Image (tube, helix red, strand yellow):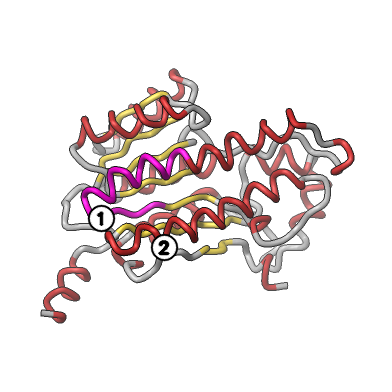
Amino acid sequence: MALAANAALSMNNWRTNMSEHPVVLITGALTGIGRAAAFAFAHEHARVVVSGRRAEEGEQLAAELRALGSEAEFVQADVRLEDSVRELVDRTVARFGRLDVAVNSAGTEGESGPVTELTPERYAAVFDTNVLGTVLSMKHEMRVMLAQRSGSIVNISSTMGSRGAPNVSLYVASKHAVEGLTRSAAIEGAASGVRVNAVAPGPVETAMLQRLTGNEERKAVFLASVPLKRAGTPEEIADAIVFVASGKASFFTGEILRVNGGKTAS
């Protein structure tokens, strides 16, 4: 029986169950890593629901995914609002009948500055998206996955989820929180066959990196501290997300996969 099960898992390739076209929900899908993940899953023949706050961009993304042959839908949602998240998950299940993979990619770096300049408003601007948004997303994704007794959730952390950095303390703290939430939810979901992990990118060629570094000179100095001497691409991070979500990582839960060019090795 064990050999048969292992053979079935091997034939299953990246998928989390035996569905031919798994259902994947991605929050924060309109830019950067979330957008790259949408294309990566579409190339793997998944049925993809992409979500974000900007309807026009979302519908355009869904159209691009459908042009690749993927069944794709856009659902407008704000991860800071529970009713919005609940509707997002419910509409996904209503459309496709299940939820196999969820990628919680919605995030913001917030406004930079020293601890002495922090305000409750700055705190809320970061934590409402990065932490509350992850909490609400997992709450409703797990509601479905626990009932179907299968599923894989991938949260997006950061290299800063395991270390400190000056002038971005709220972002750093929020990603530490995401990693703690990931580990705790993984323990809760394990008995029901629900895996919860996180991918923690280092510097990636996105608009966020441009905002954080400010200009090309500062960006070059920052990237010089990366052992591979470059930023990652959104597509490289998306490949890691697909792997973590897949059946190839079936014994992988409560873990943080750090994809950062060696940044945390030095």
Residue 212 magenta-drawn? no
Residue flagged by tag 1: what amino acid is it?
Ser
Q: Main secondary structure of the magenta part?
A: helix
**Position of 253 relative to 168 (above/below):** below
- Which marked residue is nearer to the observer: mark 1 or mark 2? 2
Start-end of magenta stretch? 136-153
| Residue 171 shown left or right of residue 146 in the figure | right
| Residue plotted at (33% across, 34% down) | 89
Relative to 127, say whether 45 is above or below: below
The correct choice, above or below, for 98 with respect to 16 in the image is above
Q: Is residue 143 magenta?
A: yes
Q: For the N terminus, which image quadrant?
A: bottom left
Q: Depth check: give the residue in front, 22 or 116.
A: 116
Q: Quadrant of the C terminus?
A: bottom right
Q: Quadrant of residue 195?
A: bottom left
Q: Position of residue 131 (x, y in %)?
A: 57, 42
How packed is label 2: few (under 14 Cα within 10 Å), some, or many (20 or more)? some
Q: What residue is rendered at 40% in x and 29% in y?
A: 61
Amino acid under disc 2: Ile
**Label 1: how many residues lie within 10 Å, few (<14), some (14-19) or many (20+)?**
many
Asked if marks 1 and 2 touch (Cβ < 8 Å), the reply is no
The numbered disc on residue 187 is 2
Look at mark 1 in the image and give the residue it sits on: 150
N-terminal of the two: label 1 or label 2?
1
Residue shown at 39% from the left, 52% from the top: 153
Q: Position of residue 125 (x, y in %)?
A: 67, 31
